[in-house]
Amino acid sequence: GTGAITVGHTSGSADAELSGYHSLNFANPITVASGSSGILKISSGGNSSLTTTFSGAISINRDLVITTAGPSGPSTLVISGGITGTGNISIVNTSVRTTTISTTSINNTGTITNSGGGSGTTTISATIGSNVTSLIQNSATSALSLSGAKTLSGSLAVTAGTLTHTSTLAIGTTLTVSDGGTFTQGAGLVTVSGNTTIGGGTSGVFTAHTSGQTLNGNLTLAVGSTWTKAASGNLAFAH
């Protein structure tokens, strides 16, 4: 059916999970309820080599976990109807399965974090709206890829693993690449409105592209960190 779906309860502590199976498209509008203290999830399951799509609009009133489940094997979870509301979004990869957020913008008032111990990648091709306060890559094994031009009103942090972008990227406040993190500028100009910090202790890697970088704040390279400048392309400071 096409009726609205509510995930979670307005009270109590019970967890709730909405899981889509097989190569199906779920166009239902989804509301993530507030009031309970349980973990609320949207996930995909079922057999491998399938694509599960949630194309209905998602409105959140508290934190939401987006995750892949089910047996091992390649498959894809697609969120394409957009996400709005208030709460943090955690994309948790626990397997080789991939997650794609596409088409309609993701514009929650809160953070977006890619995490988990799986090796499947997460791709965000949808617009990231101005309500998002921070985008965080925090998985040593699940890489985060940004495709299409992106404008972040808040910060970008790579605390573990690899983040790659393949078009222009404007960061509204700060860029931080922590120990064990790698930021790879695949293509497109990177503009940072605030300070840029690479490495908080012994590592942290920024791999630049010929498209260039414009840094409007301070650049801090910690001991042991690496900034790899492309053979061509401009590095501009406007502090």
Image (tube, grey):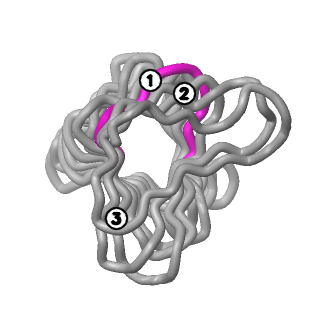
- Tag 1–tag 2 contact (CB < 8 Å): yes
Q: Quadrant of residue 61?
A: top right
Query: Which residue type carries mark 1?
Result: Thr
Q: Is residue 130 magenta?
A: no
Q: Which residue is mark 1?
A: 84
Residue 199 place in picture, x, y as percent? 59, 50
Task: State the CA–CA distance, disc 1 to disc 2.
Answer: 6 Å
Q: Residue at x 84, y 40 (%)?
A: 13
Task: State the CA–CA distance, disc 2 to disc 3.
Answer: 22 Å
Split into 4 quadrants, where in the image is the N terminus? Answer: top left
Q: How many C-alpha atoms fall within 10 Å of the one at disc 2: few (<14), some, or many (≥20)?
A: many
Q: Residue at x 67, y 47 (%)?
A: 16
> Foreground: 38 or 212?
38
Residue range highlighted in magenta: 79-90
Q: Residue at x 52, y 49 (%)?
A: 42
Asked if one can make out residue 227 in the rendered structure from this viewpoint, the answer is no
Q: Which residue is mark 2?
A: 60
Q: Is residue 88 magenta?
A: yes
> Foreground: 27 or 197?
27
Q: Is residue 96 left or right of residue 87?
A: left
First reached walking from the N terminus: tag 2 or tag 3: 2
Query: Which residue type carries mark 3?
Result: Thr
> Foreground: 162 or 237?
162
- Residue placed furthest toward the front: 1
Q: Is residue 70 above or below residue 146?
A: below
Q: Which residue is mark 3?
A: 76
Q: How many C-alpha atoms fall within 10 Å of the one at disc 3: few (<14), some, or many (≥20)?
A: many
> Foreground: 56 or 77?
56
Q: Is residue 39 above or below residue 196?
A: below
Q: Residue at x 49, y 35 (%)?
A: 5
Task: State the CA–CA distance, disc 1 to disc 3.
Answer: 22 Å
